[in-house]
Amino acid sequence: MSDQNSDEREAFLREMRDVKPIKAEQRVPLKKDRVSALSDEQRRAAAVAEQAGEKNFLSGDHVPPVDPLDVLAFKRSGVQNGVYRKLRQGKYALDARLDLHRMTVDQARRSVYQFVEDCMEQDIRCALITHGKGLGRAHPALLKSCVAHWLPQFQHVMAFHSALPAHGGTGATYVLLRKSERKRQENWERQHKRRG
């Protein structure tokens, strides 16, 4: 039986000796990640630090309840009224979305924290968090109450407001994030080119 296997193997190798691998082209052009090597090092360091102790400062304890139909509204000092009005009216492009439906409070806490951090890393200025209203539940508006409690804890969050009906109404919230230093520098350069 072993002679038959070796004969079959030799016959197979003889037949395959002229075969060359097909060069496969990429079907979808992959964009190179914008993140630099320095950023990779920072992420590695953050991952190590996170393993040592969780950096998520958001808490699910002692969250003041809000009514399922309440409008959420928050604006830091320094945010221009016109900017806040555009946020309330849903006039900013939504660059990122997070849906918290069917999550526990702890899952939502981790998701909201990571979402805001990711938005800041990617220079996202306006985002939408869908939390639902919780109507007809034992604890109505639980996630909505948590989102209203958590968002002001982020220094990066400049303002937030309940969404328009087309985006979820009082079951979703627009979030306006601080501009990164890089975006501020780009704006400054663009404005000075116009003047000069």
Image: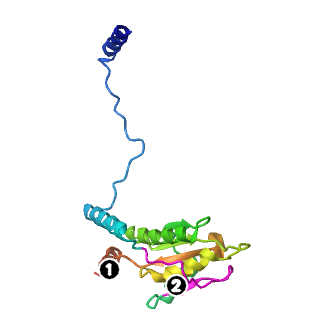
Image position, residue 76 (x, y; %): 47, 88
The residue lying toward the viewer, choosing from 91 and 141, is 141
Residue type pointed to by label 2: Tyr
Task: For the N terminus, give its image quadrant.
Answer: top left
Image position, residue 105 (x, y; %): 56, 71
Side (left or right) of 193 relative to 158? left
Residue 72 on the magenta span: yes
Circle number at residue 84? 2
Q: How is the image coloured?
A: rainbow
Q: Give the residue pinned by disc 1.
A: 188
Task: Decide which of tag 1 and tag 2 comes sooner along the chain.
Answer: 2
Residue extent of the magenta highlight: 56-75
- Measured in 3D between alpha carbons, the distance from the residue under mark 1 to the one under mark 2, in whole angstroms, is 21 Å
Disc count in the image? 2
Query: Is residue 163 visible in this depiction of the protein?
Result: no
Residue at the spot 29% in from the left edge and 62% down from the top edge = 40
- Front label number (1 vs 2): 2
The residue lying toward the viewer, choosing from 29 and 159, is 159
* Outermost residue to the right: 136
Task: Judge the density around disc 2: few (<14), some (14-19), many (≥20) Cα neighbours within 10 Å.
Answer: many
Task: Judge the density around disc 1: few (<14), some (14-19), many (≥20) Cα neighbours within 10 Å.
Answer: few
**Would you place residue 74 above or below residue 40 in this image?**
below
Residue at the spot 31% in from the left edge and 24% down from the top edge = 20
